[in-house]
Image (cartoon, rainbow, N blue to C red):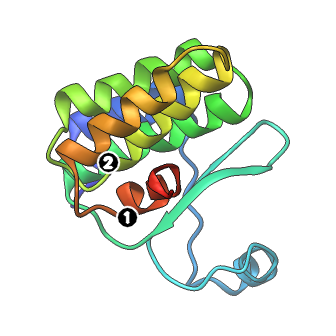
Amino acid sequence: MTYPQPPVIAVIVEHGVPVQIDNSKSENNRFLHDIHHIWTPDVRILDHNGFEMYRWEGFLPPPEFMARTQCGYAMAFLRSKRFDRAEALYVDVLTRFSTSYAAPEALYYLGVTRYRRDPHGDELLTQWANLRSRYPASEFRVKQSFKELP
């Protein structure tokens, strides 16, 4: 099990409050319908108003879950224009979980975060060049490939 692992708990509670909804109980059906729930686990990071900032479905083992959760919190900070906090989490993913499935996403959005903070700098293209070399087969490498078109 992923959730009871102490390092996983630490990552979850560092930036959020965990809530578990039992999809086998009929009293939760309306809520599950309203959020368009289709599969478990269904992990969502919401802001204080309940706005969905990040989500994913399906089991991940502890290191992958931790990396994905860090990316989720980083995205919530990025969407909230809290660039320093987003950057710190993306860098942490790249440092501690560099071989995770979430690492290419972290590198992609690290560039976006730095660009959003300073659109006159060259960090976006620098990080995307790193993405091309470190994770050439990743989906996020493809997402940045428009910058290479003639």
Tell me which residue sits at (51%, 44%) in the image: 72
Element carrying mark 2: helix
- Any mark on residue 108, and which? none
Left or right: where 110 falls relative to 95:
right
Using the image, determine if residue 43 lies above or below residue 27.
Answer: above
Question: What residue type is disc 2 on?
Answer: Pro
Using the image, determine if residue 96 lies above or below residue 4.
Answer: above
Q: Earlier in the sequence, mark 2 or mark 1?
A: 2
Left or right: where 8 falls relative to 29:
left
Camera-side residue: 15 or 56? 56
**Residue 147: where, in percent of width, then height?**
51, 49
**Residue 70: where, in percent of width, then height?**
41, 37
Left or right: where 121 falls relative to 140:
right
**Residue 98: where, in percent of width, then height?**
18, 38
Marks 2/1 in contact by CB < 8 Å: the verdict is: yes
Using the image, determine if residue 83 lies above or below residue 109.
Answer: above
Tell me which residue sits at (45%, 32%) in the image: 125
Residue 111 appears in the figure: yes
Camera-side residue: 47 or 114? 114
Give the CA separation, mark 2 to mark 1.
8 Å
Element carrying mark 1: helix
Question: What residue type is disc 1 on?
Answer: Glu
Q: Which residue is mark 1?
A: 139
Dividing the picture into quarters, in which one does residue 82 lie? top right
Using the image, determine if residue 20 lies above or below residue 128.
Answer: below
- Any mark on residue 104, and which? 2
Q: Residues within 10 Å of mark 2 (few under 14, many from 20)?
A: many
Tell me which residue sits at (55%, 12%) in the image: 84
Camera-side residue: 81 or 148? 148
Camera-side residue: 17 or 42? 42
